[in-house]
Image (cartoon, rainbow, N blue to C red):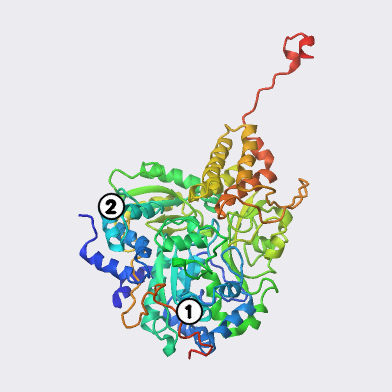
Amino acid sequence: MDEWKGSVMTAAIRYPHATGFVAGDRPKIVTSRFEHADSFTLERFLATGGYAGLRKALERAATDVHEEVKSATVLGRGGAGFPAGTKWGLTPQQVFPKYLVVNGDESEPGTYKDRLLMECDPHQLIEGCLIACYAAGLSQCFLYIRGEMALAQERVAVALNEAYAAGYVGKNILGSKFSVDIVLHWGAGAYVVGEETALIESLEGNRGMPRLKPPFFPAANGLYGQPTIVNNVETLANLPWLMVNGSEAYTAIGTKTSPGTRMVAVSGHVKNPGVFEIINGTTTFRDLIYGAEFCGGILNDNELKAFVPGGGSAPWFTADQLDLPFEASQVGPAGSMLGSGAIMVMDSTTDIPAAALTLTHFYAHESCGKCTPCREGGTWLERILTRIVNGTGTEADLQQIFEVGAMICPGDFPNASNEKLGLAAVPFPYKMTTICFVGPSAFAPLHSAITLFRSEFEARLVKRISIPVTAVSTPSAVLA
Amino acid sequence: MSRLNDANIKIALEIISHYPRPKSALIPLLHLAQEQNGYVTREAMVHLGELVGVTSAEVYGTASFYEMFRFEPVGKYLVNICGTMSCALMGAGDLMHHAEQKLGVKAGGTTADGMFTLAHAECQAACTEAPTLQVNYRFRYKVTNSDFDTLIDDLKSGRLSDEIPSHGVVARIRQRIPADRGVGAIAPELATENPAWMNGKAAL
């Protein structure tokens, strides 16, 4: 067991710790240990109340723990925001075994919180996994980490080895009847695998293509056709605190519909970009972008042009939406989504068509190829937009973007209201012709960018030379 | 020759034992093959097929879906420069241009000495530290042109060989489940009733 104590660990310690994270004077549920340089070690974890939540959970009946999580309404932090306790309850009672798959395949543009949680506090995640397995009666846990996250894989592997040796994972945990294995699994680079059914396909050793649902959701028919719970890393990281402090303390933070805290990454044109643990439901976008304790305003004190409120897939907001709180029930009707907690800010110097192209390129590139509207449509959108950005696009190209978009998302596409342009909000979500959200995501940045900043696209189009009629020597009778 | 060697076969069997179905181990095993040879060889894919009980075509089918697997030799150091929105806003385009000049190859190319492969990458989950790059999946944050030059010089001189292993090695540490502590993989046919702790009583 000593093999991990050599140069590997020293290299891992030398690595910049929790880069990007800003602590601040706010309640901390998942980031309480980040301030310690050795937050990822078992020693530090145990010295700061580690595995106390697990012990508390095991001192109660599993159904009791499940009820506690249900009454705390721990919302899923991966993007959809479905309450974890309710999800656990969706598995059929008489089908065994059930599995837990932890979604650590974080790749949404702008998002990074799961990587920090895995790198800086792997034991907290392990404890969360164990509590979930205990409460929902899950027999084995697979912890799927994104392939490119080498340090997260190393830190979680070390943590698991330590936890096994100390009796926190495996057979008869803490000397109880509770036994469960946590298997570290890692991917190999595919954005779509963040979708839960694609994650399961990938874990079965297949190409990571999403499965059609309905009829079968993973809770009923997932890994190897068995009931499977797929939870996000941040969701599970909330559980140890919840077990120690109880659901009342949890719901006392944040709002009734969005209790607790959330990790949010704010990047792009801001003075102090960072990852923050914020109070759910009450913190506004203005606080996050302009607040002194958060990003402290726009870079070079420029004007805000637009921002992406919830990861690359989300329709864009402008200054009109700055006062919305971080609360799904308000952001949805306003025309976008909170997604995975990622804000990307664009200031007045931003070349909007080029910025939209980076996202459309991303989704076209990451399409798994299963659904035609996404595979073909995404690529078409990217090609058409590239033409426009390069100055060879025409008016017809601009029109065609919407025609292609309508084949991926028929009907009205969500957009934010805009006073200057006289736009009314179209609420989220959209209709879609694809299995998962990658297809619509390719269109989302483009739709927002063109709707809100059409003149910038038009300025790029090929100019037709207009010849004044009076200059043409044609008899006026013919012209009439 | 480029099938898995004996030491790696041992590791492969250990990895397979963690899963209820052998095919689930395929992606970790492909990483193991890439670790051994720097890229995934045809022979290795045949071998992995034998180990997990599928055809080599199925192995290739899975492997070719994922971006990290390479089927031809690449440079010792794979330099991935992120070009997605936050990095693009903070100057990733200029950085890529500089990198192409410095290394003398276009994105996607490998230098003549086989040291560096330069590639354009998608979001690497370090958006507040833009522009970022990864060398063999090790991060470099807020990279300026001179940072890039220093990095390349350090890699050439071997000063970073402790921190950055050669291409193919991602995590340098594996999970080991001790025989006396592990529960063992639970296949669907092995569990026919609720786990022992689901009896309405506290486990402790």
Q: Which percent across, then down, holds residue B93?
A: 49, 45
Residue B177 horizontal side relative to residue B132, left or right: left
Residue at screen point 64% across, 41% down: A402
What's under tag 2, amino acid-wise?
Thr
Total of numbered circles in the picture?
2
Up/down of A421 relative to B158, above or below: above
Can residue A353 be seen in the rendering of this structure? yes
Chain containing mark 2: B
Residue bearing the label numbered 2? B41
Up/down of A422 relative to A328, above or below: above
Q: Are marks 1 and 2 on the same chain?
A: no
Residue bearing the label numbered 1? A130
Q: Which percent across, then down, holds residue A294?
A: 62, 65
Q: On the image, which quarter does residue A334 sit in? A: bottom right
What's under tag 1, amino acid-wise?
Leu
Chain containing mark 1: A
Query: Secondary structure under badge 2?
Result: loop
Q: On the image, which quarter does residue A381 sit in? A: top right
Residue at screen point 60% across, 63% down: A80
Residue A416 horizontal side relative to residue B126, left or right: right
Disc 1/disc 2 C-alpha distance (Å): 38 Å
Question: Residue B112, labelled with which disc?
Answer: none
